[in-house]
Amino acid sequence: MKNFVGRLFAGRNAKINVLLVLSVIGLVGLGCFGGGRSKDAKPIPAAFLGEWTAQDGAKLNIRNDGTGDYIAGSTEIKGGTAEVDETEKTVSITFFGIGKTLKIDSPPQGNTMKLDGQTFKRTGGAAFADTKSSKDDSKSDASNKNSDDSRSTSTAAKSNAAKYEVPGDEEMQEMTRKALLDFNDAVQAGDFTDFHSKISKMWQRQTSPEKFNEAFSGFIEQKIDISNVDGADAEYSTTPSVQNEGGLKKLIAKGSYDIAPRQVIFTLKWIPEGREWKLFGIEVELPAAYGR
């Protein structure tokens, strides 16, 4: 029986396409493409995340995946690179260094901050752990667990992705298992539409269910079933960790399930969305069945 290998990761092809388009249009229509965060960019402080509205109606949106929007009058930047420099006291939304930079007059206090002389109020998203009591945090965690499907992690103390916390052993096992079981459901259905709806929003914008169907066509055609990872524990080849890849901090887990009839080898990547880790890349390899 032959080996099966399928992989789909985010970022590289999207970045190449962006560069090609920008070279043609000369940075016209900045609202369509992002330039990516620099390797030296610091994580965005949780207090700045969310949707903000200024007194004059200007709109600012800062997302934890390193992207953001700024709309004010005739200026419109969507999906740009968001950076907060607390040393220089600036907030910027740019494309390859071109865009809007705002001076931080007063950093966020709860849901209010002052930039360029304007008071901005948070109108979307949520105040993060830095501005909540531990009691509020526990309620938020419970709410997040109840709102997800039956394969949500049930660990009592979940990691906070907004702070780039690496999940504990139990939570990491559950996240790995869930990603692979969701993947397996898509293979059995021959349709990755539902799987696509569960991955990170940033990755959703870069790919499509059809691309998943193409990448894992061999699995679909042969109805490869890895449902036996349910109830099993993964053996990690390296300790799962947060690493900087392509200007984004990602939680990366590599390892295998040594289960009959065939081993399941995987590489999984997640990025933060709020306090949650969301899938941003998957590779699954199935060597020939044992004894064949």
Image: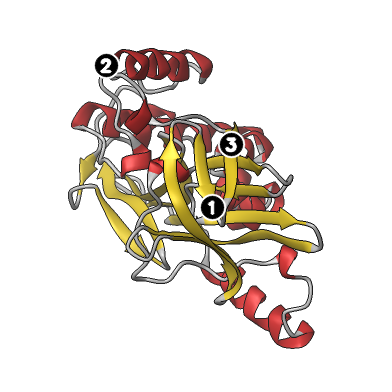
- Indicate the secondary structure of the residue bearing disc 3: strand
Q: How many callouts does the rendering have?
A: 3
Q: Which of labels 2 and 1 is toward the front?
A: 1
First along the sequence among labels 3 and 2: 3
Q: Report whether residue 95 is seen.
A: yes
Q: Residue 115 got which mark?
A: 1
Percent coordinates x, y for residue 221 in the rendering: 63, 47
- Relative placement, left or right, of 177 versus 216 is left
- Indicate the secondary structure of the residue bearing disc 1: strand
- Relative placement, left or right, of 102 versus 282 is right
Compared to 284, does 172 lie above or below?
Answer: above
Dot 2 amino acid type? Ala
Dot 1 amino acid type? Leu
- Relative placement, left or right, of 285 versus 33 is left
Percent coordinates x, y for residue 105 in the rendering: 46, 53
Kindly indicate the quadrant of the structure image that contains residue 124: top right
Q: Where is mark 2, residue-wise?
A: 156
Q: Report whether residue 6 is seen.
A: no
Few, some or many residues within 10 Å of mark 1 (<14, 14–19, 20+): some
In percent of the image, x 57 and y 76: which residue is there? 96
Compared to 100, does 183 lie above or below?
Answer: above
Q: CA distance from mark 1 to mark 3?
A: 11 Å
Q: CA distance from mark 2 to mark 1?
A: 38 Å
In percent of the image, x 63 and y 37: which residue is there? 197
- Indicate the secondary structure of the residue bearing disc 2: loop
Q: Residue furthest front?
A: 117
Q: Where is mark 3, residue-wise?
A: 121
